[in-house]
Amino acid sequence: MANFQKHGENVNGRVLHTSPGKLYELGVWGPVDTRTMTELDVSIRPASALVTVKRAGMVPGQNVRIWQLIGLPVGRFVVEARDGGGSVWTSVTIDTTPQPQEAAAGGRKYTDNPNEQVTKRTTPTARDVVTMLMAAWSDLTQNGARTLAAQFMAKTGSGRYCFNWNLGNVKAGPNEPHMYLRGVWEVDSVAGAQTQVANAGGLAHVASDDEIKKHGWGCRAGESIAVFDPPHPQCRFRAYGSLTEGAKRWLGRYQKIAQRNSRAPALATAPEWRTDVLRHARNSQVDIDGISVPLNGRVHDCAIGGKTLAVVTASSVVLISLGEGVVSKVSSSGGDRVAISPGWVAWSNAATLNWVQRKGHPFD
């Protein structure tokens, strides 16, 4: 018997929530009536001239047909898959009315930028993430998928703080689809935090001791925490339309690292190193082969080039020699992404790209 699927899970008879006006995809497992060898047809009720129901392709390697619902208005709609005789084989209810969780996440726009999207909570399970990663990257091993899924679970509170299908808390520039999160915090030196607040135009403050204790934030002696509110760039994160899109874009960053590092087979050792670095982002330190390297500011990104690890934090860019833990500072300005090659180190801060030549650095 056929059943509707979402993220590889049987959702027959369930109520699913989404935002109005967005493309919504459902899978139909077992889409063919083997008695007549005709495919089931999908429709919605109540019928709406605003909605387009479109048959799409099959999921590669699976007996699942994708159906797209385009232009759903606010309300509740029953989606049904029927055979040629009109019998319903499977159904699901789609609810597009605003949910309380969206208000908790922000639930509104902060700017008139057409690339900004309303923030909404999206909570896939670890199993969903592993399945999607394995499907998106054929060379990824099971352990590799679990490693990346573990990073997702750690960075998003087991999925509770995953919004708009952003699996890795990936920051965004103003020209990318994005959403804003409130209360984004960054560990920095006391002076660094004060400088960030002073330059934030009223959209940041230095966290009090009570605030740090309340949220369970961690910073060491001599450090402070700057807290940002929308629409500050520190609060701007990539927004994706589905788990499939979010997983592919997130995974694409690791695939590029793997391709650049010939010593990283299949899974790519680079993503594992990167996961280890980001796992300690809250503590503003990197642990590599038992060596702890303290850093100024929360770790945002890292990349491997040969025997050198490039790390960008909220307030600096540094190179760390693998195996020795020796640190060489590249820049005292922070950023959100970093890349490294034998000849240069590049990092971005929102829409600004910076780079320096590596010649003369001690780990070349």
Image (cartoon, rainbow, N blue to C red):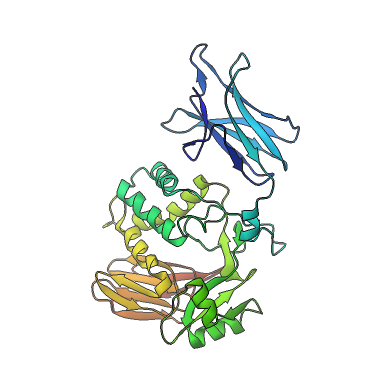
Q: Position of residue 175 (x, y in %)?
A: 62, 60
Q: Quadrant of residue 151?
A: bottom left
Q: Position of residue 251 (x, y in %)?
A: 43, 52
Residue depicted at x 60% and y 35%:
68
Tell me if residue 361 can be seen. no
Q: Is residue 56 above or below residue 40?
A: below
Tell me if residue 328 can be seen. yes
141 to the left or right of 52: left
Residue depicted at x 51% and y 56%:
160
Q: Quadrant of residue 106?
A: bottom right
50 to the left or right of 99: right
Residue depicted at x 38% and y 56%:
150
Which is more toward the observer, 318 or 92?
92
Q: Is residue 280 above or below residue 47?
A: below
Extreme-top residue of the structure:
36
Which is more toward the observer, 95 or 31?
95
